[in-house]
Amino acid sequence: MDFPILGLMSDDACDQFLVDTLHPDGLCCPGCRRDDARSVHDRHRPPVFDYRCRHCGAVFNAYTGTPLQKTHRSPTQLVLILRGICQGTPTAQLARELGCDRKHLLTLRHRLQGLALQAAEHMGPVPGSTTEADEMFQNAGEKRHLPPGPR
């Protein structure tokens, strides 16, 4: 996943990035699945608005029904968290950089990584005859010399 850093320097841009990522077909009501019958219900956390469906009356926002539901972080923080997870940044370092609790961040990370693993299992093998791998873990677990035994 690519994160265009220069294009994501504002809450509005990050919010649009998250909406486009979470709802590639467009934001719609989670109840009746209509995308033409929503109106702004609450503006307490701009740019994340709560909407009310004029068809079924459901109140929802861009995170409803997604792994980010009930997270009270700004869009910028969420994008930085996703970027850090994709880059393999340790949770403790992310928590220090964002000034948030490591335990809550770790819970969110586990939830997101679990969903990514489920999605990867359903995708099947990588298409094409050539696959590129990262060399970082090429010799993971190998030891050049055995440690000295007890004396």
Image (cartoon, rainbow, N blue to C red):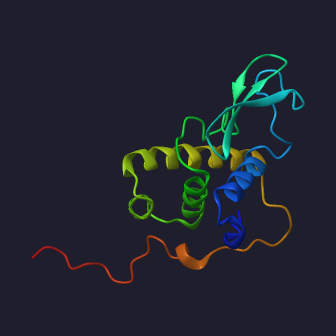
Please state the total of marks drawn on the protein image.
0
Q: Quadrant of residue 95?
A: bottom left
Q: Residue furthest bottom?
A: 144
Q: Nearer the viewer, residue 54 or 99?
A: 54
Depth check: 6 or 112 in front?
6
Q: Quadrant of the C terminus?
A: bottom left
Residue at coordinates 54% horizontally, 57% vertically from top-left?
81
Query: Is residue 17 rendered to the left or right of residue 28?
Result: left
Residue 106 placement (x, y as % from top left) = 44, 49
Front residue of 26 and 44: 44
Q: Which residue is most to the left?
A: 151
Height in image: 34 above or below 72? Answer: above
Residue 69: image location, x then y, percent: 60, 36
Q: Residue at x 59, y 78 (%)?
A: 135
Residue occupying image coordinates x 78% and y 50% = 20
Q: Residue at x 64, y 49 (%)?
A: 116
Frontmost residue, 39 versus 94: 39
Position above or below: 23 against 84: above
Looking at the rendering, which quadrant does residue 41 occupy?
top right
Q: Is residue 150 left or right of residue 95?
A: left
Q: Position of residue 36 (x, y in %)?
A: 90, 30
Residue 24 locus on image (x, y percent) = 82, 47
Residue projecting furthest to the front: 43
Q: Is residue 33 left or right of residue 83?
A: right
Outermost residue on the top side: it is: 56
- Position of the N terminus, as image quadrant, is bottom right
Residue 118 placement: quadrant: top right
